[in-house]
Amino acid sequence: MPQISLQTATAQVDARALGSVARRFVLHWGEMGSRWGVNRTVAQIHALLFYSGRPMCAEELAESLQVARSNISTSLRELQSWKLVRVVHQVGDRRDHFESHRDVWELFRTVTRERKLREFDPTIVALQECVADPLFTDEDRDTQARVKQTLVVMSALSGWGEQMLRLEPATLMKVMKLGARIQSLVSPPSTVKP
């Protein structure tokens, strides 16, 4: 994984508008966004809004990130479609301001829910359609078994994910911390790997 060159990448983020920690956070989030399949500018805007914890107008975002105003507008529309930012209004200011979730758990839930809707659910539907197709029975038994097993696993993960998203953050944190200990509860000790 290549490291971010702060000297090169810093030109993208206005040093006067952001402190060094904020700049590092925004730059890293932008790099990670591109690895997650999100445009770097989209990820940087989200990072800046999340980090600052306050509403910002498009002009302030463009100045802080040293990005064209048109790019900011397009990126904000994408963030809104993902339900990661929302429009808020300031008294005495006719411009739209944008804010991100401040609660990391709500952010996590939103990202998980949106990715599930856009990526996971359509895959389950496609697998269901494959299995339901009358021509599927003409396929090799091993192929049928692999596709059916993939559908079973993805459906189970989808259901589990929905249950996890409904948990309160404190409960979800406890479930996450259980980690490997769950395996020792459901498997005999001789089959538990360290």
Image (cartoon, helix red, strand yellow):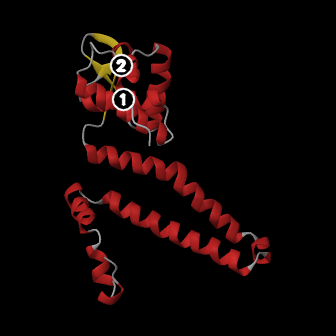
Count of numbered labels shown in the rendering? 2
**Would you call the spot at circle 2 few (<14 residues within 10 Å), some (14-19), or many (20 or more)?**
many
Between 63 and 118, the residue placed more toward the observer is 63
At x 28%, y 81%, the residue is: 184
Q: Which of the 4 image quadrants contains residue 17?
A: top left
Residue 52 x %, y %: 24, 27
Q: 42 left or right of 13?
A: right
Q: Indicate whether 4 appears above or below 150.
A: above
Element under disc 1: helix
Amino acid type, mark 2: Val
* Closer to us: 179 or 131: 179
Mark 1 surroundings within 10 Å by alpha-carbon count, few (fewer than 14), some (14 through 19), many (20 or more):
many
User: Looking at the image, is mark 2 or mark 1 earlier in the sequence?
Assistant: 2
Q: Secondary structure at mark 2?
A: loop
Q: Position of residue 140 (x, y in %)?
A: 75, 78
Q: Amino acid at mark 1?
A: Leu
The quarter of the displayed image where residue 42 is located:
top left
The picture places residue 174, in percent across and down from the top left corner, at: 21, 64
The label shown at residue 13 is 2
Q: Are marks 2 and 1 in contact (CB under 8 Å)?
A: yes
Tag shown at residue 27: 1
Q: Quick check: 15 left or right of 134?
A: left
Left or right placement of residue 31 versus residue 52 in this view:
right
- The residue shown at (58%, 74%) is 149
